[in-house]
Amino acid sequence: MSTKKRVLTGITSSGKPHIGNILGAVLPAIELSKNADIESLFFISDFHSLTTIKDADNRRDFRNAIAATWLAFGFDYESNLFYRQSKVPQVAELTWYLNCFTPFPMLQYAHAFKSKAENLSDVNAGLFTYPVLMAADILLYDAHVVPVGKDQKQHIEIARDIGRSFNHHYGEVFVIPEASIQENVMMVPGTDGRKMSKSYNNYIDMMAPKKQLKKQIYSIVTDATPLEDPKDPDSCLVYQLYELFADPSDVQGMRESLLKGGYGYGHAKGALLEEILTRFAKERELFHFYMENTDKLEEALSIGEEKASEIANAKLKQVRELLGY
């Protein structure tokens, strides 16, 4: 077992990463993984995606896009673990065992189920037991810390309760994980002003081809202030996005131009497009390289999947023996 503190993060393969995902999750996680005292386990939770995505081609495309994004931004997959959940199917076996230690009411009150409980025909068994699979993802690897947003805290509490229930019967088998609540997760506005989200279809895919990226940026909602009039930067979505990653001097320049007048929202959108194309040119190039050379993705992921399988097999061997299998 590793002497480093294990930090585990799951990335659901329900779509391609957008600016909000990259600025709010990918970059902070990669920065954390550079800590020499930490062993980061980043996995693509493609089993979880089956609760909503039934099309195999979509799942493969989303999974590849997520892997390509993390690699393009420099995640060290050799010093840490980067793997597809489905390539370590031992987690499915552990999920069954943990199901048998999970009381029905615990799942009945889980957020994912409660949000759809009024229309049970839309709820499949996978969605209902989703928190148990998530618990297995964590407990299988003896993860110490799981960084989550406030809306995911309940899932970690469920994993802790299930782990403690198993340990109560069989001793200290599982490490009981701690949630690391990300209080200051970057809130990235979408093109309509709401939080950027695939479900709202208001996202900007910074890895998209230039023509598609331009179309998304130019769809950002703005008011009808004439070009020659002064504009309020703080209520301008284009400016709010630009200041998230542009150089401070360039941000100040856009601010002054908007306040002065004679600078239209089209100018601001053009500056945002150029900033993304320039600042993330290397990452965009690497992303497209990996998407066009999926054998390179396979090579990178297989390294983490081999390591993850070793950990999973050791833990399952222990669990099976305790259960009499």
Image (cartoon, rainbow, N blue to C red):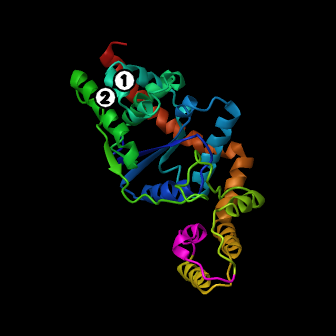
Vertical comparison of 325 with 177: above or below: above
Q: Magenta stretch: residue 242 in it? A: yes
Residue occupying the point 42% across, 24% down: 95
Inspect the magenta stretch and tell me whether residue 135 lies in it: no
In percent of the image, x 54 and y 29: which residue is there? 51
Cα distance between the residues tagged 2 and 1: 7 Å
Q: Secondary structure at mark 2?
A: helix
* Place of residue 300 in the rendered image (x, y in percent of width and height, measured from the top left): 60, 45
Q: Along the line of sight, which residue is nearer the eye, 223 or 75?
A: 223
Which region is colored magenta?
228-246
* Location of residue 130 by image quarter: top left
Viewport quadrant of the C terminus: top left
**Residue behind mark 1:** 98
Amino acid carrying label 1: it is: Leu
- Name the residue type under label 2: Ile
Tag 1 or tag 2, which sits nearer the N-term? 1
Q: In percent of the image, x 54 and y 25: which residue is there?
A: 122
Q: Is residue 4 visible?
A: no
Could you say where residue 252 lies in the image, as x and y percent from the top left? Answer: 55, 82
Numbered circle sitting on residue 162: 2
Examine the rendering and report whether any part of residue 20 can be seen. Answer: yes
Q: Quadrant of the N terminus?
A: top left
Q: Quadrant of residue 220?
A: bottom right
